[in-house]
Image (cartoon, helix red, strand yellow):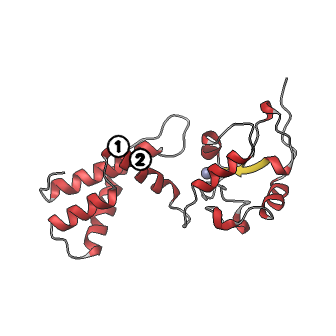
Amino acid sequence: MKRSAIKTTIMQAIEFWSERVDECFLSVDWSETHSHCWRCGCERNLQRCHIVPHSLGGEDKPSNIVLLCSRCHADGPNVADPDIMWDWIKAYKVPFYGTFWSIQAQEEYKRIYKTSLSSDLNRISDLASIKHKDEIANKIENSLKSLFQQASVHFGQSYLNTATLAGLYRMMVKQLAKEYNIEL
Ligand SMILES: [Zn+2]
């Protein structure tokens, strides 16, 4: 059976949910939910996503639709309990626009290296006796700029995935440690 196109409009979904979910739980303000993904808060083309999947009886109506970017849509839960989608969206709330994927990469970094990126950078600053915040910030920026050329996107993806970004952070830390002769 071919699935018919979703009829619920973006505005209908926003009208419905803005009255029921407080934006303090989200990575996005309601005033920008027509253009910014409800999970990651990034400005993207948004997809109308079923909360309960069509295949599990989810209907085409505003109460069953949220707006996500393609990346978050692919990561989202597909289960029959409608609360799960909102549990998931709220759990990923970040306070500032544009920080979502960097924060996910820092979580990934912690998972892999059992230490946080910020504590690694603080350690390097301390051991290298870097007194000025600007100095380390400039080093980080320059290092990342050059390292981005050593990363690539997966075929069909338009972004650096979380593992790639976490890897770049690690390469940056290694580069700085080497420059200051510090053992990680
Ligand atoms: Zn997103």
Query: Would you name the residue on which mark 2 appears?
Result: 108
Mark 1: few/some/many CA within 10 Å (<14, 14-19, 20+): some
Q: What secondary structure is marked by label 1?
A: helix
Expressed as whole percent of the image width and height from the top left, the position of residue 142 reads 31, 61
Mark 2: few/some/many CA within 10 Å (<14, 14-19, 20+): many
Please indicate whether residue 75 sits to the left or right of residue 63 in the image: left
- Out of 158 and 112, give the one closest to the viewer: 112
- Out of 183 and 22, give the one closest to the viewer: 22
Expressed as whole percent of the image width and height from the top left, the position of residue 61 reads 87, 47
Please indicate whether residue 101 sits to the left or right of residue 82 in the image: left
For the residues marked 2 and 1, what is the alpha-carbon distance in whole angstroms? 6 Å
Q: Type of residue at label 2?
A: Glu
Say if residue 15 shows up in the picture.
Answer: yes
The answer as to whether callout 1 falls within 8 Å of ligand 1 is no
Establish if 63 lies above or below 156: below
* Rendered image quadrant of residue 163: top left
* Rendered image quadrant of residue 5: top right
Expressed as whole percent of the image width and height from the top left, the position of residue 156 reads 56, 36
Q: Type of residue at label 1?
A: Ile
Say if residue 149 shows up in the picture.
Answer: no
- Residue located at (83% from left, 61% from top): 15
